[in-house]
């Protein structure tokens, strides 16, 4: 068996055994420092770095337990493997409880040593890789990586700084593409829960019948098809943060159960009588008008106030155009690096096009446009032609009215525009009423009206 090269401290008072194991490990490509005394091993551990320690439990001066304790103090992540005789297995097991990686019993085969070294070395590398990835993820969501120089975003950043260290629930509102999950991660990774799980779920993407089990878990046999138990996302997020995205689309009956979990700080899996205590911070998000949904009685007001201990609203990109150049340059640098291209920014025409665009998809749309432009760009700068944006000027209201027939009545104009707005919002009367600036009741009074030529009628459905 072969493993990647690592630096091993080998401690064994039997000279023949010491030479045998050292030669075997060196043949496998490792660098081995071999010592016969525990005090010498302790001194080397305090002065030098090692990737792995292999030590006899019984040494003439200090025992292997003292070598283990020194290793844990001086180089905590270094795995320690103990060599023990049959009569000291109980001591070796105790050593594992104190942090030793494993032990091998004399007499042993050299292949057994090789296997243990390979497993211990791989386990350490996996721990270091996991730590590196966690640090990289945490760094990605530090506040300095949230971009925006506009006053609106500076207000958001200030609120995140104030809210992140606490444990109170946060409700993030804003249009699709404004970066709600990015803010949720910033709240998590700038809190005391950063080393614990961040668990996201899109409540709109999971059918209501399955969402309850996803969130709260279930026991075996709780329902047809429950062939095993499931912990649920609340328990998966224990000690960390549970991010409930699109909470505004959650079914009302499930909202009541969620409210009970928040109030009791316990969760009861489906089919179980046991209430399990929770230590979870909730961050929720929605692109819906929550207050409109409360008025329509499809979202519980009491749940809103439980979730929105701190409400945080993200403004759309069209309301903070001063952030567009900053975001565009950021997305350009990231996309160009990934594509292996050197692109020196945007031409003045391209930047002007970005500033004119209304960005209905917000920052997510801007990122997609820039990534596409990077793919299409062969020159040193992004040209406006590679953005593939609709750059035609928006017609003024006066020009539109000038093209209408003189026989169009004011009532017909109102009906035509009302029907147009309803088509744009897929028949959602609450949204249409908000766009039109009228009450929903007023909109209902018009529902029998028709547009020009009786070609369009206002939908009857909500």
Image (spheres, rainbow, N blue to C red):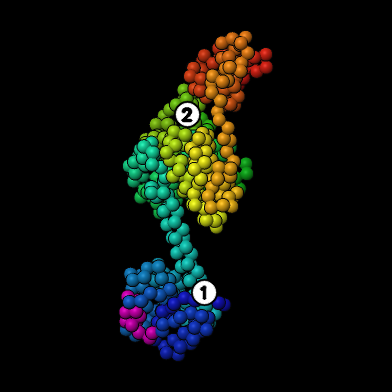
Eyeballing the image, is 454 above or below 310?
Answer: above
Mark before the other along the chain sequence, 2 or 1: 1
Magenta region: which residues? 35-46
In the picture of the structure, the residue carrying the numbered disc 2 is 289
Please name whichever residue, 412 or 461, is drawn nearer the observer in this view of the structure.
412
At label 1, counting other C-alpha atoms closer than 10 Å, the crowd grade (few under 14, some 14-19, many 20 or more) is: few
The answer to whether residue 280 of the structure is visible from this angle is no
> Which residue extends farthest bottom?
16
Left or right of residue 42, residue 219 in this image: right
In the picture of the structure, the residue carrying the numbered disc 1 is 4
The residue positioned 47% from the left and 34% from the top of the image is: 318
Please name whichever residue, 243 or 416, is drawn nearer the observer in this view of the structure.
416
The residue positioned 52% from the left and 41% from the top of the image is: 349
Query: Magenta includes 239?
Result: no
Q: Which quadrant of the rendered structure holds the C terminus?
A: top right
The residue positioned 42% from the left and 57% from the top of the image is: 135
Tag 1 secondary structure: loop
Q: Position of residue 187 (x, y in %)?
A: 39, 45
């Amino acid at each position: 068996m072969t493993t990647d090269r690592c630096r091993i401290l080998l401690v064994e008072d039997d000279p023949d055994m010491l030479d045998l194991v050292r030669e075997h490990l060196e043949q496998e490509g490792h660098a081995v420092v071999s010592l016969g005394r525990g005090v010498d091993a302790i001194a080397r551990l305090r002065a030098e770095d090692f990737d792995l320690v292999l030590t006899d439990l019984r040494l003439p001066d200090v025992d292997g337990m003292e070598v283990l304790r020194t290793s844990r103090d001086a180089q905590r992540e270094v795995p320690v493997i103990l060599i023990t005789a049959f009569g000291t297995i109980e001591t070796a097991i105790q050593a594992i409880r104190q942090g030793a990686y494993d032990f091998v019993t004399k007499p042993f085969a050299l292949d057994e040593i090789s296997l243990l070294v390979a497993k211990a070395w791989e386990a350490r590398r996996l721990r270091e890789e996991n730590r590196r990835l966690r640090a990289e993820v945490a760094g990605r969501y530090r506040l300095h990586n949230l971009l925006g120089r506009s006053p609106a975003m500076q207000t958001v950043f200030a609120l995140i700084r104030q809210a992140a260290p606490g444990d109170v629930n946060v409700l993030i509102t804003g249009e699709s593409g404004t970066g709600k999950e990015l803010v949720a991660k910033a709240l998590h990774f700038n809190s005391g829960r950063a080393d614990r799980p961040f668990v996201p779920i899109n409540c709109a993407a999971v059918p209501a019948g399955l969402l309850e089990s996803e969130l709260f878990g279930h026991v075996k046999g709780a329902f047809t098809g429950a062939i095993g138990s499931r912990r649920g996302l609340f328990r998966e997020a224990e000690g960390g943060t549970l991010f409930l995205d699109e909470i505004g689309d959650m079914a009302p009956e499930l909202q009541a159960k969620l409210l009970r979990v928040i109030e009791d700080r316990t969760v009861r899996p489906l089919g179980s009588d046991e209430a399990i205590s929770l230590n979870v911070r909730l961050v929720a998000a929605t692109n819906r008008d929550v207050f409109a949904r409360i008025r329509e009685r499809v979202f519980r007001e009491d749940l809103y106030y439980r979730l929105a201990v701190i409400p945080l609203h993200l403004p759309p990109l069209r309301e903070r155009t001063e952030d567009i150049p900053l975001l565009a340059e950021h997305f350009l640098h990231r996309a160009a690096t990934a594509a292996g291209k050197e692109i020196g920014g945007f031409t003045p025409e391209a930047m002007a096009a970005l500033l004119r665009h209304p960005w209905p998809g917000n920052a997510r749309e801007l990122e997609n446009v820039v990534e596409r432009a990077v793919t299409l760009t062969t020159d040193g700068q992004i040209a406006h032609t590679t953005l593939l944006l609709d750059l035609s000027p928006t017609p003024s209201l006066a020009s539109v009215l000038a093209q209408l027939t003189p026989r169009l009545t004011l009532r017909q104009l109102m009906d035509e525009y009302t029907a147009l707005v309803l088509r744009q919002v897929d028949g959602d009367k609450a949204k249409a009423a908000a766009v039109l600036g009228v009450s929903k009741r007023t909109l209902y009074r018009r529902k029998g009206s028709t547009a020009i030529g009786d070609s369009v009628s206002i939908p009857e459905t909500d």
